[in-house]
Amino acid sequence: MARFEVKLPKMGESVAEATIISWLKHVGDNIELDEPIVEIATDKVDSEVPSEVEGTLVEIMFEADAVVKVGDTIAIIETAGDESSNNKLEKVVVEEPKETSIVENEVEEAIQSKSIEKVSSSGKFFSPLVRNIATTEGISMEELEAVIGTGMDNRVTKNDILAYIQNGRIVKETKPVSPKPQVQQVAIEQPKIQQKESVKSAAPISVNGEDEIIEMSRMGKLIAHHMVESVQTSAHVQSFIEVDVTNIVKWRDKVKDRFFAREGEKITYTPIFMQAVAKAIKQFPMINISISGDKIIKKKAINLGMAAALGDGNLIVPVIRNADQLNLVGITKAVNDMANKARNGKLSPDDIQGGTYTVTNVGTFGSVFGTPIINQPQVAILALGAVRKVPAVIETPEGDFIGIRHKMFISHSYDHRVVNGALGGMFIKTIKESLESWDVNADF
């Protein structure tokens, strides 16, 4: 019999750890190849980890709610193979030098003696990563308990404690040792303390017996955290433009039945707009960037994120990779596939990674236009408003007259640190021109 180590797989770029939600299998259960054994959650998406082998689950290394790093062993499966497996635990244990084990134990004991406890006196759990950061930064248990957590069951995540450190920790006054220096120090620091507290504190909310208190979902907490973080990071500016999409409406009405019969897919306005966005990005590549410190990272791939609704009403942003290389049929299939996955909770971590620009369709909910928040680390996002029939002035060689046209607004939010008004405005003007010049007689 061989023993196989089930490791937490890599779940996309920038994802270094995950929280174990629940075990789908228990010790002693038989495991089939590719059968899900554990459900995990990252700060991006929930997913299941399938088994790479067949066998019997003999050991579970982490309980539910534990935070595990990518690459860590989370379970052991006993397989009906030979003993030549590189993942064999017995081999690792036998070959480990005794002296190394002793040294590692001493180091671990030294770290534990200086680090923060795993569980506080009030019952709050802190992951090893959070405790190590707190120890390194000199954050006490009392101070750590005051940090607002966005993880499962209000747990403090790595991002929470890093944001707490970055935004400035609460400085406490100490009793003066020597009167003169301390009086001067308090006079200087006191305004800073008051300023930080005024930013962090919220107005008190009164709750009476008729009010209902609803706990935010884990995804809701993460979205709230990311939205606030984006507003604090980017200097948001918006540009708006109205687009006449009458030709597109007529074209879609004419081809939608034939499109479905040939491709097996329903065509909506979204893929048409996504194609126009991809073309505009090729013309204005400085929209397709990210910021790293004082450097600009110009992205080669055009990976379009599309905001999609989850089953619980929250939004998520799956990514259509290399959208500029897809024709209209290809983009339509990609859009429909991602929307269906989102609705059915089937998105994988890779489906939401690597986006370089995001499009959100606020018109789905009847909104004329919106001011969307940038999806970090991108620098811009486009909102598509509802398509409406409106009276409009139509210019002809014989003169102007009033007619009924299909129009919509598109809203462009961009990071004014790197995208100025000229670039932001020209970008959506190019999209407008592309959509308004749509050929009613075009094929697909």
Image (tube, rainbow, N blue to C red):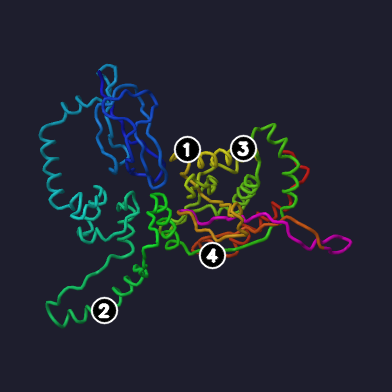
Q: Residue furthest right?
A: 398
Residue at mark 4:
237
Write down the quadrant of residue 332 in the picture: top right
Determine the residue positioned at 70% across, 55% down.
433
Q: Is residue 347 above or below residue 289?
A: above
Q: Pointer 1 and pointer 4: residues touching (CB < 8 Å)?
A: no
> Mark 1 or mark 4, which has the lower sequence index?
4
Magenta span: predominant SS is strand
Q: Is residue 132 above or below residue 183?
A: above
Q: Amino acid at mark 3?
A: Gly
* Mark 2 touches mark 1? (CB < 8 Å): no
Residue 350 covered by magenta stretch: no
Which residue carries the number 2 mark? 188
Bin the neighbour count of mark 2 within 10 Å (Cα to Cα): few under 14, some 14-19, many 20 and up: few
**Nearer-N-terminus badge (2/1):** 2
Q: Amino acid at mark 2?
A: Ile
Residues at circles 3 and 1 in contact by the CB criterion of under 8 Å: no
Earlier in the chain: of badge 2 and badge 4, it is 2
For the C terminus, the quadrant is top right
Mark 4 closeness class: few <14, some 14–19, many ≥20 residues within 10 Å: some
Within-10-Å neighbours for mark 3: few <14, some 14–19, many 20+: few
Do the CB atoms of the residues marked 2 and 4 lie less than 8 Å apart?
Answer: no
Which residues make up the magenta segment?
377-401
- Residue 235 place in picture, x, y as percent: 48, 64
**Residue to which mark 3 is pinned:** 330
Say which amino acid is labelled 4: Val
CA–CA distance in space, label 2 to label 1: 55 Å
Rounded to the nearest whole Å, what is the CA distance between mark 3 and mark 1? 20 Å
Mark 3 or mark 1: name the one nearer the start of the chain.
3
Q: Nearer the viewer, mark 3 or mark 1?
A: 1
